[in-house]
Image (cartoon, rainbow, N blue to C red):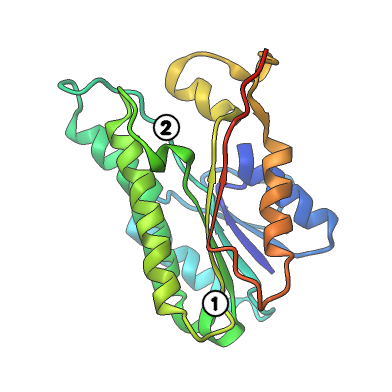
Amino acid sequence: MIIITGASDGLGLQVAKLYQEAGKKVINISRRESKFANVNILADLRQGSDIQKAVREIKKLRQPLEAIINCAAVLSIQELGKITEEEVDRILTTNVKAAILLVSNLMSRIKKDGTDIVNVASSVGFKGYTKQSVYGASKWAMRGFSANLQAEFKGTPSRVISFCPGGFKTKFFKKATGIDNTKNAGNWMKAKDVARILKQTLDLPKNMEVSEIIINRKKFE
């Protein structure tokens, strides 16, 4: 079975669709149900108690846990000098804390099943941008978390992949900016194409670990 956080929308939804089509049991953890999930665990990933509840539900499932894909995230566009404590808490708890607690609480199951872990970061985690201090920090943090997990699981069947795509078409961007990039052909990547790369990477033989993959948006006239 495949666990995906945030499979109700965006990239997570497209990844869930691919796995359902491949005949895999998909477990979605998010505030809303995913139409491509076999099991929906409704949880607010900002809340530690909800993450604990999700972990208890997962531990009841007896099928081998093939992969955990930490996909849930929110975008923040906020000028330096105007950043609020509430915004820092919102971004870091959703984008970083949830992944850390989920993996940590499933550690024994991961080792038992040889579970692979994908942490969805961003190309934003490689350079700085204006108005994205909080969001950028969260994505740098996810890359750091992946590096530490690779050390933790060294010598085990579990692979850890830091997955860092550039901009692609989802409602993710509109929620933070009000700009709907899904209607702009431009050079934005398609979420289904990014999802395909993620799944193809996981489909590689277990003795091949792609430690980090960066997918930049190709701009051209």
Q: Residues within 10 Å of mark 1 (few under 14, many from 20)?
A: few
Give the number of the disc on residue 59.
1
Which of the 4 image quadrants contains residue 101?
bottom left
- Residue 37 sits in which quadrant? bottom right
SS category of the residue bearing label 2 = loop
Residue 98 drawn at (x, y percent): 39, 56
- Pick out the residue farthest to the front: 220
User: Which quadrant: the C terminus?
Assistant: top right
The residue at 42%/32% (across/down) is: 75
Numbered disc 1: secondary structure = helix
Residue in the picture at 37% in, 68% down: 148
> In whole angstroms, how far apart are the C-alphas of marks 2 and 1?
30 Å
- Residues at marks 2 and 1 touching, judged by CB atoms closer than 8 Å: no
* Residue type for callout 2: Leu
Residue linked to disc 2: 75
Q: How many neighbours does mark 2 have within 10 angstroms: few (below 14), some (14-19), or many (20 or more)?
A: many
**Does residue 26 show up?**
yes
User: 44 above or below 205?
Assistant: above
Of the pair 137 and 74, the residue shown nearer to us:
137
- How many labels sit on residues? 2
Viewer-nearest of discs 2 and 1: 2
Amino acid, disc 1: Lys
In the displayed structure, would residue 56 be above or below residue 87?
below
Most distant residue in the left direction: 81
